[in-house]
Amino acid sequence: MAASCVALLVLALLVPLLLLGLWKRGQQTGRARHVVVVVLGDLGRSPRMQYHAVSLAQSGFSVTLLGFYNSKPRDELLLNDRIQIVKLTDLRGLGAGPRILQYGVKVVFQAVYLLWKMMCTDPAAYIFLQNPPGLPAIAICWFVGCICGSKLVIDWHNYGYSIMGLVHGPRHPIVLLAKWYEKFFGRLSHLNLCVTNAMREDLAENWCVRAVTLYDKPASFFKETPLDLQHELFMKLSRTYSPFQSCSEPSDPDTERSAFTERDCQSGVVRRLHGRPALLVSSTSWTEDEDFSILLRALEKFEQQALTGDSLPSLVCVITGKGPLREHYRHLISQKHLQHVQFCTPWLEAEDYPLLLAGSQVPGSLCSLNELVKHGENGLVFKDAEELAAQLQMLFSKFPDPAGKLSQFRKKLQESEQLRWDESWQQTVLPLVTHK
């Protein structure tokens, strides 16, 4: 009896959806130039999908962007008339019952909710989906594509099951189920993108998924930032994070000062402080224990070298990003009491991240890939803490002397021509979505 009731309920839900899907299949007007971009996560923290949306809009598509609106996306996206944002609501506050039950309820809620939201959007030629998170989004986007005539494009950033394994363990039943789900439904996509050739080869060899590599290149708005805008960001961050606060008050009351810059409020002139600390920005997903350990050990070696009397500056290390191990690493950082190194783990607005990179002496990633980084040309590659520590010591010696190694390397990097996201997307993705 109960099974019959459930079957009737499912049928009652599916029939209207199928009828709506058949009706939407018949609505051809505008379909070929409309794309739905889905992020089952925070839009403001999904720069690559924001770039997809902007690139699609610049290429003449109308874009519906679905995702959680926990932090503000970039203005380039918000001000584009071709992009419509549909805000999704996350299920929060479910604190009763076993964790696996809570997770199951959340997945079911997200599946029904995402299905409803997507069926309410205009017919689209393509559905772009970020993975991870892919549970339950891959199956829902595939299903919507089947009944509405849309092609599914998955952009593989990582494997969702492997990130879940960091929390639950690789052999946990829910992780094994997630792996099967991701592998099965991932094969049903029409087109696939990924971030590296290594991942493309792994997808082909182990998952039978053919993908095209689209590297994470900087977008056009990543460029040299005027010093006054850097100062405004430093002052903004100084109100929350102590490493950005000035160690001394300026003697002139008409001067405002951060740890790195000061501005004459009457003339508006901004200058860098001569005795400022060096600024190191590292981006990480807070998922790889080994990568973070390398950084931490390297900074401890940097501290030891600074204490020996070498001409090394104090260092502010800003670590951005999010992930399941974020709080674990923040706890480890809090236990370190270094004299020459301060840590900061800020939550940045989308517009603030490129400004912070522009103001840093060494922007970088803990995942140095030979595919993207050419040692000595556009970056430095390291394999362990000893190499990273040696590179930091080399770069920051004589800081902030313009004749130092860091200034020379930055000048060389500025002179090198690198392919931007816009050009890379036009060459790689646009032919895929305009090919008939």
Image (spheres, helix red, strand yellow):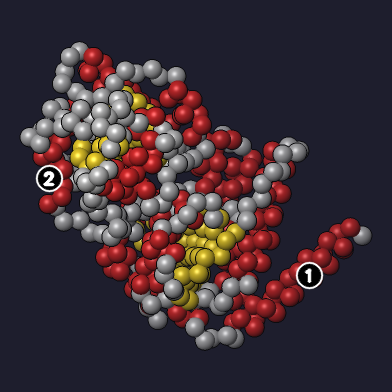
Of marks 2 and 1, the one in the foreground: 2
In the image, residue 287 lies at what x, y percent? Answer: 46, 37
Q: Residue at x 30, y 69 (%)?
A: 426
- Residue at screen point 56% across, 35% down: 167
Q: Which residue is mark 1?
A: 11
> Which of the labelled discs sits on residue 429, or is there none?
none
Residue 400 to residue 187: above or below: above
Residue sitting at the far top: 308
Residue sitting nearer the eye, 375 or 218: 218
Amino acid type, mark 1 = Leu
Circle 1: element type:
helix
Identify residue type, mark 2: Lys
Whole-percent x, y for residue 115 in the image: 64, 65
Identify which residue is drawn at 51% across, 31% down.
327
Q: CA distance from mark 2 to mark 1?
A: 65 Å
Q: Residue at x 52, y 65 (%)?
A: 85
Please tell me whether residue 181 is drawn above or below residue 188 in the rendered image. above
Question: Disc number at residue 411?
Answer: 2
Q: Dot 1: few (<14), some (14–19), or many (≥20) neighbours within 10 Å? A: few
